[in-house]
Image (cartoon, helix red, strand yellow):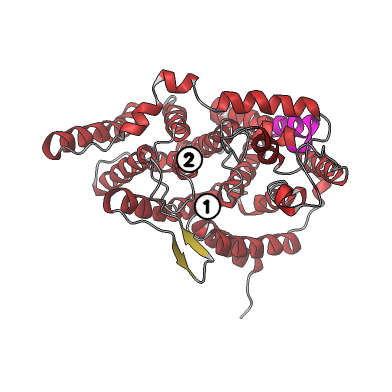
Amino acid sequence: MKINKSQFGLLTFNIGIFLLFSAPWIASFFLLISIFISFFNDFKNPFKDNINKILFLISLLMIISLISFKVSNQYFDLNDFNSIKNTNPYLSLLNWIPLFFFFSSFQSYLKTDKNRKYFIYSLTFGSIPILISGFGQVLFNWYGPLEFLNGIIIWYQRSNTTGMTGIFNNQNTAGCALATVWPFFLAFLLTKNKYDYKNFILILLNIIIIFGIIFTTSRNALLGFIIGSFLLLIKSKSKRIINAALGFISVFIINALTDILFEISFIPDSLISKLNFKNFISDARYFLWKDSIKYVLERPFLGWGGHSFSTIWNAQNIRYFGHSHSLPLELAIQYGLITAIALTCLIGFILFKSFKVIFLRFKNQLNFSEINNYFDKAWFSASLIIIFSNLIDILYFDIRISLLTWLLLAGLINIVREKELFN
């Protein structure tokens, strides 16, 4: 029996997507298989693509920064492991250069609307463990960590946080994941025209996702939810807006009824407290960003080295922070301003081009499909949410978030290429 390599690669790719949240290391194994198949089965000169050329140049800048890694002994003693355990320039490169290569390889599995739909199904079904573990944590005190396969799979289920973490190590990471998949759930609801049991199930799923986002008490996730909802409802037909409104309103009705009947409020007080204006203006991020800019200006060209913020900050301050809470600033601290600006502008360019194609020019395409356009809108919304979340926090260092970021960007590139052919 002859195995079709392309179909096998697509299968392993979608298995990896399905397992991405719940079992990231196993998911990485399947994604690596799909990447190798893509590389050998559909090899193309990567330097024919201008985006790949830019990523290659950014990689060179990162490597040059690594080679020139010499920092002041005021903060680092390079002979003392404990002094630089959070400042490892070699490990830091693994967050970037391999993922640049993966980004190029992932595109072969996201070329068509059909393939991107497979991805969406795999991702949304794969997000269900976040909800199961998270609701179990919040409602039934299922605390962890839960370990499977000798620690290859870990569901953290934190008991000492103010919000739901679920399978993640951090509530903001859980919130980012749920907010990122939310537009796809909403797109499924918006493409249903009939009021039947499927519509009811979709409304229920959307309600559960909204509560999941609320339970994380993450402001980033809440802002992502608002952004995603707004983008998908732009120019939607009235019936589809009604579908979405039913889901939104149901959340507050359920919360009000449970509060009256059982004295249980599903909207945490800690989230309401975080939305207080006084808490916004006293947020530690302002102090972190102020000092981060100072660190960047001290070594603007090649940076301080990988994960260096933690060592510099904690040498001067009592309160511990592991990063600067802004990915562009973190890049500038680690690798210098040129690298940070180049990568930020590249991602901004991808978002700008895809927004034009998806939101402004889709009706001029010969293959126009309103349903497919909802999923393209959802794809853009998810991409914007995950990028926005990393502008005011850093969730990227979780492998699930970094992989998902480059997967979504790879999909956007294909949407632009596919749709622009018809303009």
Viewer-side residue, 245 vs 117: 245
Quadrant hosting residue 268: top left
Residue under label 2, please give it: 172
Q: Is the C terminus in the top left, top right, bottom left or bottom right quadrant?
A: top right
Under circle 1, the secondary element is: helix
- Circle 2 packing at 10 Å, graded few (<14), some (14-19), many (20+), is many
Q: What's under tag 2, amino acid-wise?
A: Asn
Viewer-side residue, 397 vs 400: 397
As drawn, the label of residue 119 is 1
Residue at image position (42%, 47%) is: 165
The secondary structure that dominates the magenta segment is helix
Quadrant hosting residue 422: top right
Q: Residue 292 magenta-drawn?
A: no
Magenta region, residue range: 334-347
Q: Is the N terminus in the top left, top right, bottom left or bottom right quadrant?
A: bottom right
Quadrant hosting residue 265: top left
Residue at image position (44%, 23%) is: 279
Under circle 2, the secondary element is: helix
Residue 395 lies, in percent from the top left, at 56, 42
Q: Is residue 105 left or right of residue 127?
A: right
The residue mark sitting in front, 1 or 2, is 2
Q: Is residue 157 left or right of residue 391?
A: left
Q: Residue 345 magenta-drawn?
A: yes
For marks 1 and 2, the one nearer the N-term is 1
Q: Is residue 286 above or below residue 371?
A: above
Viewer-side residue, 411 vs 391: 391
Residue 215 lies, in percent from the top left, at 35, 40
Q: What's under tag 1, amino acid-wise?
A: Phe
Residue 254 lies, in percent from the top left, at 21, 37
